Amino acid sequence: MSAMDRHEQAYTYCAYCPKLCRFACPVSEATHTEAHSTWGKMTAAHLVAEGKRDLDESTAKALHACTGCGRCKSFCKHENLVGPALFAAREETVKSGNQPKGAASTLATFTQAQNPFGPELAALVASWRSETPVRYPLFPGCSSLVKAPQVIEDTIAVSRAFGAPMGVSRVSSRCCGYPLYAAGSHDAFRDHARANAEALDSVPELAVLDPGCAHTLKVVYPMFGVHLKTRIRTVVEVLEENLSHAPAKPPLAQTVGYHDACKLGRGLGQYDQPRKLLARAVSGVQEAASIRSEGGCSGGGGLLPRTMPEVAVEVARRQAVEVAPQPDVAVVTACPTSKRMFERSGKTSYDLMTLLRRWVES
Ligand code: SF4
Ligand code: SF4
C-alpha cells in the first residue's frame, strides 16, 4: 500500500469539486496559477493515483506548492485534509526522482544530521543546561535551537516571571521529524516517530515552543500509529494557564498586529491563549480581516521556503499586509518560522515570547 492510497477519497473529493475553496489557498493567491490551487494540486494527485498522469517535473512541483496550512479545510464542506494528502503524494516524487531540489537537499541533510539544518543538536541543547530546578521541561524545536536561540532565552525568562520555570530538556536534541513528513519520506518519518516515542518514554510532560513541533508530536504522530505517553503542551498554553501569577504591570504602550500561526491555531485550536497573553503585554492589538480558523499563512510550512523560496516570501508579504499594513506596526506571532518569514518579506516581526519578556522586564 502506498502512502497515497490512504488519501484516495480526499483526492477524489477535490477532483470532482467545483473549486469551492478557490480563494483560500495562500500559495495560488501568491502565484496566480491554477495548477497551484487546492483543486489543481489535488486533481494532479488524483490523476497520478489513477495512473492517468505521469509524475513529471511540473506535476512534482505542483505537489510541493502547499504549506500544509489547512486554510482550505476551513472552507471545505468535507473538511478535506489536503496538506497530509499532498505530503503523501510527495512520496511518489521521491520514487520517481522528480522531487524538487530544495526538498531533496532537505532530506539529504536530515539523513546525515537527523535534523533539517545540519548542526549537531545535542551540543546546542547541552549549552542550555539549567542551574536551577525547573517545573516544565522545554522542547524548543530545532528551528529555535539553530536559528533563534534568543527566543529560548526569552521563553525561559518569561516562564520564571510567570512562576512556571522552564528549562531546555535533553530530549530536545531530537527533531520531531516534520521535514521527513513534509517531504513525503513517510516510512522514514514513521521510524523516526517510533524512535522518538521510545526516547520520550520516561518524560511525562513537555512544554513545546514551536507550534509546528507540538502539532507534529500531538497530531501527526497518531496519524502514523505512534502515540506518545508524554503530555504535549505548547509554551503558550502553559503560560496562559499561569497568567494569574504574571507580574502586575501595565501593558507596553505599543500597537502590534497578531498573526495566528497555522499549527497553533488551526492545528491545535489555540486561538484565545496567545491573544490573552498579548492583551496583557501591549496596549493595542490589531487583527487581519480573516483570523482564527480562516486566518492567513506565513508561507513557512510544507518545505515551501526550500522548494519555492520566492513564493514563500510573497505569501509572507501578503499576510503581513493583511495583519499590519502600516509600516510602523510590527507583526507578532507565536511561531519562530513565521517570524522569520515575515522578516524575510521585509516586515518587522516579534516572537510573542520576546514581547512578553519586554513586558515582564519593563
Ligand atoms: S478542499 Fe474541499 S472545497 Fe477545496 S477543492 Fe477540495 S473538496 Fe473542494
Ligand atoms: S493546505 Fe494551505 S497551502 Fe495547502 S492547498 Fe490547502 S490552503 Fe493551499
Image (cartoon, helix red, strand yellow):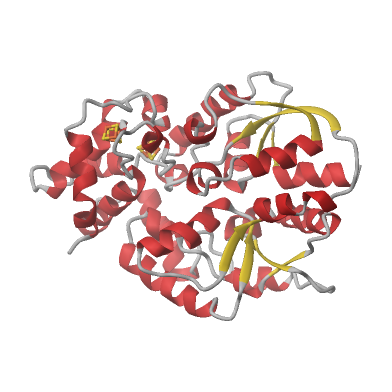
- Residue 56 visible in the picture: no
Q: Is residue 294 above or below residue 108?
A: above
Total labels drawn: 0
- Residue 101 visible in the picture: yes
Quarter containing ligand 1?
A: top left
Q: Position of residue 257 (x, y in %)?
A: 67, 28
Res 139 quadrant in image: bottom right
- Would you say 69 lies left or right of 337 here? left
Quadrant of the frame with the N terminus:
bottom left
Determine the residue positioned at 42% across, 35% down: 71
- Would you say 150 lies left or right of 95 here? right
Q: Is residue 142 above or below residue 336?
A: below
Quadrant of the frame with the C terminus:
top right
Q: Is residue 172 above or below residue 358?
A: below
In this view, which residue lies farthest toward the left?
52
Determine the residue positioned at 78% across, 57% down: 159
Q: Is residue 230 above or below residue 209?
A: below
Res 181 quadrant in image: bottom left
Q: Nearer the viewer, residue 60 or 51?
A: 51
Determine the residue positioned at 50% across, 64% down: 176
- Would you say 146 lies left or right of 76 here? right
Q: Position of residue 191 (x, y in %)?
A: 38, 73
Q: Position of residue 258 (x, y in %)?
A: 65, 32
Q: Nearer the viewer, residue 274 or 319?
A: 274
Q: Position of residue 224 (x, y in %)?
A: 35, 65
